[in-house]
Amino acid sequence: MLLRFSVENFACFAELATLSMVASSDRSHPGHVVEAEAAAGRGRRALRLAALYGANGHGKTRFVEAAMALQRLVLHGVRVDQALRHTPFRLDSALRGQPTRFEIVFRHEDAEYEYGVVHDARRIHDEWLYAREGDGREAAVFVRTTAADGITTVKQGRATPKLKRGLFGVLAAGTRMNQPFLTEGAERNVELFAVVRRWFSEVLVPIPATAHYVALPTHARDNPDFGALLGPYLGAADTGIVEVTTEEQPFDVGRLRELPEEERQRLVEACERGETLSVADDEGETFTLCRGKAGGVVMVRLKTHRRDELGQNVEFDFTDESAGTRRLANLLPIVGPGADGRVYLVDEIDRKLHPVLARELIRHFGDAQASGQLVFTTHNTHLLDLDVLRRDEIWFTSKDARGRASLASLAEFRVRKDLEIEKGYLSGRFGAIPFLGNLRDLGWR
């Protein structure tokens, strides 16, 4: 469960920007709030939804990318000779050489954690992990600093796990200046570190605007409940689809003649390890490849079904469906079986979707009896409705004249309960909208 995420000196966010998922005293939409299940949460109530609005180029996507950058750093670290990915605010010469700061607070497996990292392209300046468990008190797991000469110092805290004598010192001494200590410890099988890392790998799910769910066909094949839901779900969106099935066929990797033999072998090995891959053949046709139930590399296709005027079944390939239908299917895992407990960060959730469909998707997620969370960016002003979202679930990104982005919640504005939020937003009351110059000045007619 995400409670807070902050970023500073990343892309357009020069100053510290924080998205808080801690619920305010607002009493509307009680189903959108999850109560703390453990003493570690100290009774804090977490929101299940957050919508980010803003003009084009004002930071919505960058905020999602910030979460992706932190996730990538924790899960994969960096190689010995690799520079850290550093994306500072570039419109201020004083900040271009300064480090980026990430802070995240989340609840996982009956404990609350705060993890933070400050880094530039060369080294991790500071890193820390705090935990709050049953007694409700916060304690440090570790606090790490790396000096300009590359020497890393890691201090233990009250919550540091019990390790074999000397192991903590070995870990600290063996952590490179460009490698997170959290990642190093997780890879060395320190269980507490592995627990925290699992939240980043298994719970946090960023979805870029142009992404598609590569494993959708195999997920439908391997999870009957999900596969059975897919057809009715798309049919309810007035697509005419009555059923979705999967089809598995052996795949001859020889069809990928333009790939070097080594690449083809790596593809086969990846599928045999259980990975799902999206591959385009020499003709430009895209396939979803994975390990077959009986072994070997197979191609899994989704098939949609409709009825003709005689009531007969007519089968279509999923690739024949419209971009909007495919987008809707790719978003189903957010509300389908298995979504409970995950934190989805979706950029442009309404991309290629009718506004009514997007509204119903958000409504469905908010009304579901689950503990999952959905943070999304959107331009869909039809969602700016207090019948759909709480005030503390609506956020605005804005840029000032110097190109610096900021983030603010509607709950920070003094608004009447009967205010038409959509009208107020479009009129510029909350900022976060484009202010256009006179297009005639560009010579347009």
Image: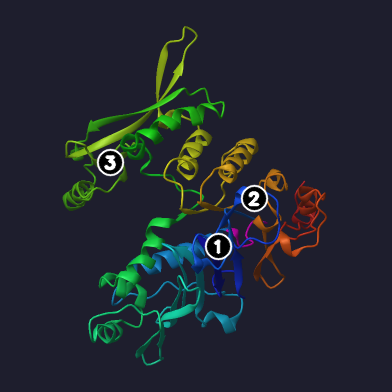
Image label count: 3
Q: Earlier in the sequence, mark 1 or mark 3?
A: 1
Give residue 346's position: percent from left, percent from top: 52, 52
Counting from the top left corner in percent of width and height, residue 39 is at 50, 67
> Could you tell me residue 110's position as x and y percent?
44, 63
Q: Name which quarter of the figure residue 251 lies in.
A: top left
Residue to which mark 1 is pinned: 62
Foreground tag (3 vs 2): 2
Disc 2 marks a residue whose amino acid type is Pro
Q: Which residues are magenta?
A: 54-60
Marks 3 & 2, CB-CB < 8 Å contact: no
Q: Amino acid under label 3?
A: Leu
Mark sitting on residue 289: 3
Question: Is residue 102 positioned above or below 1 on the image?
Answer: below
The disc label shown at residue 30, or none:
2
Q: How far apart are labels 1 and 3 at the CA level?
A: 31 Å
